[in-house]
Image: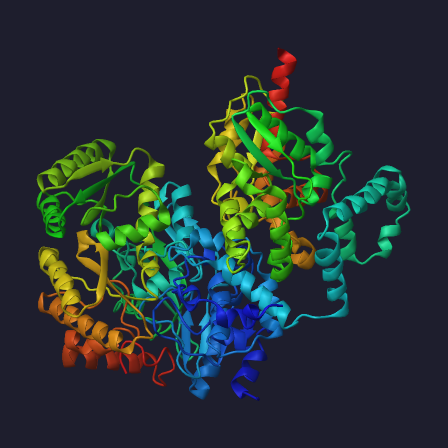
Amino acid sequence: MSDSELNLLRDLDYSVVQQCMHCGMCLPTCPTYVETLNERSSPRGRIAMMRAVADGRRELSESFAEEMYFCLGCLACQTACPAGVNYGQLFESARAEIERQQLLDSPKRRRIRRWTLGWLFAEQRRLQRVARLLRLYQRSGLERFVRSIGLLRLLPQSLRELEQLTPRISSAFTAEHHARTADPPDARYGVALVGGCVQDVAFADTNADTIYALRQNGCRVLLPSDQVCCGSLHAHNGDLESARALARRNIDAFAPENVDAIIVNAGGCGSHVKHYDHLLRDDPTYASRAKSWSEKVRDIHEFLVEIDFRAPAVGCGVGAVTYHESCHLKHGQGVSDAPRQILRAIPDVELVELAEADWCCGSAGIYNITQPEMSMRLLDRKMGNVRNTGAPVVATGNPGCVIQLQHGGHREGIDLQVVHPISLLADAYRAEEKVS
Amino acid sequence: MNDPIIDQLRSFLKADQLLTSEEDLDVYSFDGTALLHQKPRCIALPESSAEIGRILQVANGAKVPVVTRGSGTGLAGGSVPVEGCIVLCLVRLNRILALDVKNLVMVVEPGVLTQKIADEASAAGLFYPPDPGSIKISTIGGNVANNSGGLRGLKYGVTRDYVMALEVVLADGQVLQTGSKCVKDVAGFSLRDLFIGSEGCLGVITKITLKLIPQPAAKKTMLALFDSMTAAADTVSSIIENKIIPCTLEFLDRVTVECVESHAQIGLPTDCEALLLMEVDGHPAQVAEQAEQVVQLARAGGAREVRLAESAEEALRLASARRTAFSALARLAPTVVLEDVTVPRSELARMVARIDEVGRRHGVKVGTFGHMGDGNLHPTFLCDERDQEEMQRVEQAMQEVFDFAIELGGTITGEHGVGLAKKPFLPAQLGDVGMAMLRRLKDSFDPNGILNPGKVFD
């Protein structure tokens, strides 16, 4: 841990903390406040708690730490805040300080953190190896066998839910898909794709669709092979040092100077990698490269709209589709209209607006594992709104939301198709080829 | 740390209804007002008026102060705790009890959000007009206790004009019913009216019967840009002189427009000295005619540009953006001290000019916005509470603004209330007789002085 991180909250530029003038405009947009009606579980309350620490009036306590982990980090408050409070920055600093002081430390928690943040998500090739094993378990019939004899009932409730939240591993990972189709000969743009970590092994199809849609729009698509997890899981869980290390490796792997844009198709990752400039601002070697990285990063929807994407001539064979906004796409990146524009451009898609579309679904990174009760309350709320649209398809631009909403479908016993908007666009482009 | 009051409350409240941790005391120690905070003894979250009665009995017996609040968005410190108090937070009493379309009334609990009332009324084709800036989060109980105004005061009046009946738990725990669903009701003194705007000093409001009106069939929203504040103020006067009562006549000065645009990003022009947001509503034919007249009057008054909102969504975006004005000003300074002076409409231009002059003379940055149609201005002082010398200048400037408002026949507060922030300035406006009557009233409702003591007056 570097010296610059000592007393993270006290060292924060005080104006960031003081920016909050406690008007309360954030409260009705905060999912945890609306569910609990407790001031401490509101952005205004959490900032007041951080300010007490920043002022030196209060030491960090376990109850402070618990509250900071009860926060979803959905950033809806940031969109709502007229005063422009940078809640995301405050929240990451608070969690980092909690980890630095080891306030929630327990052998089990340490083990989980070391295993996930320190091992599984630290090397993409390692994650791919684990994913291949998991795929074998899921496809060999072993999973069905284990489920059928009720072996899972031996697990505690929380682990059983977790087992259901485990994504299906893709039959081929992103690199294989990337090699299957070719760049257009007359490419207008050169872009590089952030393949993601979980996305790469469990949602490789979405990556394949992204690559296909980009190529259909005149892009040469690079897939840097040395890329690693973007580090958003680490940053949101108080491990800023690992997040910085991952950011540096990605900047090296991508060489942002050589591409027109760096494309991300996962809302959570996009929101984080757009801020590499802030994350590495004090790094003498990387600060300026991080700045040029951040300038190049685009969410896939944002980019396609920017380059005036081609509307497909035929449909993708769906019908009524509703759109759920990933928090970090909407609140973290301010991308809200572009995905809708893409969906509306597909001839047979009838976009039905979802009530509370930008309300968190409870996935929130690993929140559905760490806070299962609140996560499921939010999922139920979301599913109620989805049901009211009558649409059998939900489009959403973040893998965490996809897993959560699919889980919601299982819980309710309804046949719900959850897809990335870009997959529908790619399907429509493919349908064009068949027609012609 | 044994506290007999907390022990007594714990005997009938569930664990999650009584908060006593240091963190909880911190987060309930302020409301929306700058500079004011005080930690309470504990926070009670009652779920029924019976529980409120028992809490008040405990407090009254031990002479412990009680500060009632909802979402804590007050702007005069009315819901900031006092030392040793029980905070009575009513957010869990949040049910709409009845929507009576035959009598055009809605019966609600005090913790219902104002926006929810507006939405429910609207879904039934009805209209609840009062719309304070914080409508999305303010509770109706807080609105009644502060007699809140909003953007539509000019045509539709304020909260008082929509309260038909109240249930109030008195300081000793007794329950008072006052008012009825009848439009005409002169049985006895109107006790109901005493509680409206009483800022939690006379009783705890536990049920509210609200009047609703039919929804206007049409509305049109316009935006006019001026190169001088005086031209905008004169335009407002000429609109009213021409016997047009728009439902909204809001203005923002250059500083405020810049901040609002920086937050909302809806394309507001940031190079004009004053912006008027105007809305007319009613019968479609009348709305069309009045909108046309308003546009012409604004042009004649020197407006550089007049725009008509093209859709209901655009109109909503404009109104929502206007509502964020106060908070958006916080982008410019760490501390924003918001005032609420109101003057007769005919004196608006003079008042606006004086605010500007006072700010310059004391070297204090001021952003002004407000409800020009009803003379209610919100000069907002942009400062830094850590700079004591600057805060002194702010205080002097404020005093001069208040004095001038009173001199013009106005008031120190149009809609935010007195609370703690305006308390020192109240005697100058009400005089000795007025103050003495307030005290006698307070003593007869709350002889032990437990309800929000030290607010409005000492």
Residue B45 lies, with reference to residue A226, above or below; the image says below
Residue B12 lies, with reference to residue A156, above or below; the image says below
**Which quadrant of the rendered structure holds the N terminus of chain B?**
bottom right
- Residue A167 point in image, percent of width and height: 74, 43
Comparing A305 with B431, the one in front is A305
Comparing B146 with B49, the one in front is B146
| Residue that appears at 67% across and 70% down | A104
Tally of numbered tags: 0
**Quick check: can you spot residue A299?**
no
| Residue that appears at 51% across and 23% down | A310
- Residue A192 point in image, percent of width and height: 59, 36
**Which quadrant of the rendered structure holds the C terminus of chain B?**
bottom left
Comparing B23 with A355, the one in front is B23
Looking at this rendering, what residue extends furthest in the front direction?
A285
Residue A187 lies, with reference to residue A156, above or below; the image says above
| Drawn side of residue A178 relative to residue B183, left or right | right
- Residue B441 point in image, percent of width and height: 26, 78
Looking at this rendering, what residue extends furthest in the top direction?
A436
**Quick check: can you spot residue B161?**
yes
| Drawn side of residue B90 relative to residue B232, left or right | right
| Drawn side of residue B135 relative to residue A290, left or right | left
Comparing B210 with B27, the one in front is B27
Residue B444 lies, with reference to residue A13, above or below; the image says below
Quadrant position of residue B202 = bottom left
- Residue B56 point in image, percent of width and height: 45, 78
